[in-house]
Image (cartoon, rainbow, N blue to C red):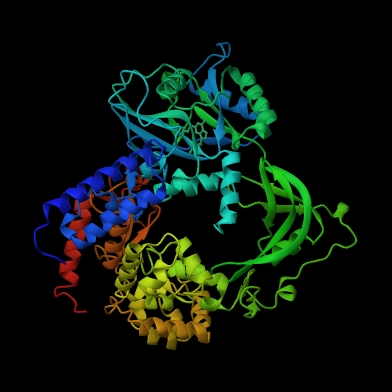
Amino acid sequence: MPTAPIPAEVRAHADELRAQLARHDHAYYVLNEPLVPDAEYDRLFRKLAALETHWPALVTPDSPTQRVSGTPAPELAAVAHSVPMLSIRTETDDTAAGALAFDARVRNALNLAADAPPVQYHAELKFDGLAVSLRYEHGRLVCAATRGDGQTGEDVTHNVRTIGQIPLRLRGEGAPPLVEVRGEVYMRHDAFAALNERQEKTGGKLFANPRNAAAGTLRQLDARIAAQRPLAFFAYGLGASQGFAVPDTQDGLLAQFAAWGFPVCSERTVAAGAQALAAFHEHVAAIRADLPFDIDGVVYKVNRLDWQARLGFVSREPRWAVAHKYPPQEAVTEVLDIDVQVGRTGALTPVARLRPVAVGGVTITNATLHNQDEIERKDIRVHDTVVVRRAGDVIPEVVRALPERRPAEAVKFDLLARYPVCPVCGSRVVRNADEAVARCTGGLFCGAQRKQAILHFAGRRAMDIEGLGEKLVEQLVDENIVRSPADLYRLSVAELARCERMGERSASKLLEAIDGSRATTMARFLFALGIRNVGERTAKDLASHLQTVEALMGADEDALQRVPDVGPIVAQSIVDFFAEAHNRDVLAALLDAGIHWPAPPAPVAAKADHPVRGQTFVLTGTLPTLSRDAARERIEAAGGKVAGSVSRKTRYVVAGEAAGSKLEKAQALGIEILDEAALLALLAAHDETENPSSQGV
Ligand code: IVH
């Protein structure tokens, strides 16, 4: 690399390229009107990248080479919701009774006399997409976040910016200093069909329904992918606001949203009293099949916002709103055949191939039958006429057979008889006595498991190889460049650069990431192997109790069960894994490739009086500096456990900003609450007493 000062004309050239690229980015992402063809953009981009490689001192953080385009964000950042995004209580009674019950609860809570006039409600559709919160400061969109757990969502601003329907600036004069507009991001049926068609052509993954497609798109790290998949939006609620003269009613609020330029669904009404709500429910049921998007019910809201405030919340659900659902959507069709799908862990799932049938705007062509026991319990046979159901976001399922319509040629299905060997790799299929599931024994060798096995291996919590995504793994496996995780460590830039959408620069970046992953921990490595029933926690326990891979491979079921939390099933899975010669081969090849780790931490014995070791922590809210993963890692490294919910066993609750119900529960139970500083102090004290000298590697 030249160390001489960068010549002025090089600097000027880079500046010019950056300015051009920024202009193109703006036109492409924000205006959705590219100024130049992609190839021209790529040419400029490569030119700049080449300059920056040659003169590393030229790289600035705001260079287009350093952001989303081409180099997706490593992960979605967390966004704390200052006003939580709540869920709504669901009224499942699908008759008028649902509306009556809600109205009665509202009148009662408002202390209205029996002869008081009917309550004014606002009735809306319940869109089947994803809730997002759009934050506008002085009229500009500054952040878009998913709902997440209601307290903390994910930053999807980059993708939301590509949604043409969402204004980047609020229309009209006098935008408030702050307003959060909430609503649903969804995908229309036509966009969904077009997307799946394209996916099929390009060999991409098919989405089960528009909701999954919208969710998958919104959570993309690369905004260009979202830009190619038209998402849509409806505004329906208000989050935080400052300096905003909030209208008196929900109806007025939605009118304001429309004036700012948001799409507001016109299928809505102000309804006086329960009968009017029930009429809306019935009306929507009648038009539902003709809507160009999915809904899963209607929502009733008290129209007056001051009354909403008076009604407040119970257990994190507003008392002023209710979702009134429709019964699940069912249809009748024929089972043409039953075959199996082989999953990452080798599970063979029987799948009914159906005569295509439309259910709620989506054509169903197959449905899961779960496992052999389910097939027998429901007595479903090939050529049977069956009822299939699509409920919310779940995979379609076969509800029941109609034996009265069973033809003479209907045949029972016996999975093991039909698939004695795996349809993908030809390895033996077995079914353990205690399991409902039949499995392929091909492990890392089976083609069906290979892609998933490699993806899992490269995953963030496993070997953490950044940039090795689904598309690339698919290509590498399909073209036989990579057959097992060990092959990753033999890849060359030339081989990678032959893959679609892989320039030399990304190829060498990926190789760097692969190379870097060689230095890992034993726990990550064990988890990465994808041994059935060995999750992260178990991998950590195995590493600290057995210390070496040799000891693990040599351990029999009894020895394995002496590791805390390892029972007979986990022990059996480990023994089975190492019994397969090809799994041992892959493992040896990985170690040959130079994967190494420091000695695992020694096992920690739980002691009730120890401040950290053996104690259970619960994390809630957003901590000022530590991410959840980082906090968890540090607590676990000190021998503590992190649980998902507060119980009497919880020793500490670590609460950050926008902490929610977990904090309330901890207070109610009198559990000690720590902030980040207190947690760090506790961990530091622990380090001093436990590890007076640092451990060598
Ligand atoms: S209002 C406090 N209105 O339903 C009430 N939600 O269970 C906040 N949804 O995650 C929600 N259509 O994704 C509201 N017209 C509508 C809705 C709607 C769909 C979803 C939303 C939320 C879930 C609440």
Q: Residue furthest right?
A: 408
> Residue at (43%, 21%) from the top-left corner?
253
Q: Residue furthest left?
A: 5
Question: Which quadrant of the view contains residue 441?
Answer: bottom right
Q: Does residue 273 show up?
A: yes
Q: Position of residue 590 (x, y in %)?
A: 39, 81
Question: Which quadrant of the view contains residue 21?
Answer: top left
Q: Does residue 94 show up?
A: no
- Between 694 and 179, the one nearer to me in the picture: 179
Residue 57 located left or right of residue 513: left
- Between 336 and 14, the one nearer to me in the picture: 14
Q: Position of residue 276 (x, y in %)?
A: 63, 19
> Residue at (49%, 23%) from the top-left corner?
109
Q: How many marks?
A: 0
**Looking at the figure, which quarter contains the N terminus?**
bottom left
Q: Position of residue 654 (x, y in %)?
A: 28, 51
> Residue at (74%, 45%) from the top-left corner?
331
Is 588 above or below relative to 393? Answer: below
> Residue at (39%, 35%) from the top-left corner?
31
Is 122 above or below relative to 620? Answer: above
Q: Residue furthest front?
A: 9
Q: Position of residue 17 (x, y in %)?
A: 25, 48
- Between 688 and 631, the one nearer to me in the picture: 631
Is 341 above or below relative to 65? Answer: below
Residue 577 located left or right of residue 59: right
Residue 79 located left or right of residue 51: right
**Looking at the figure, which quarter contains the C terminus?**
bottom left
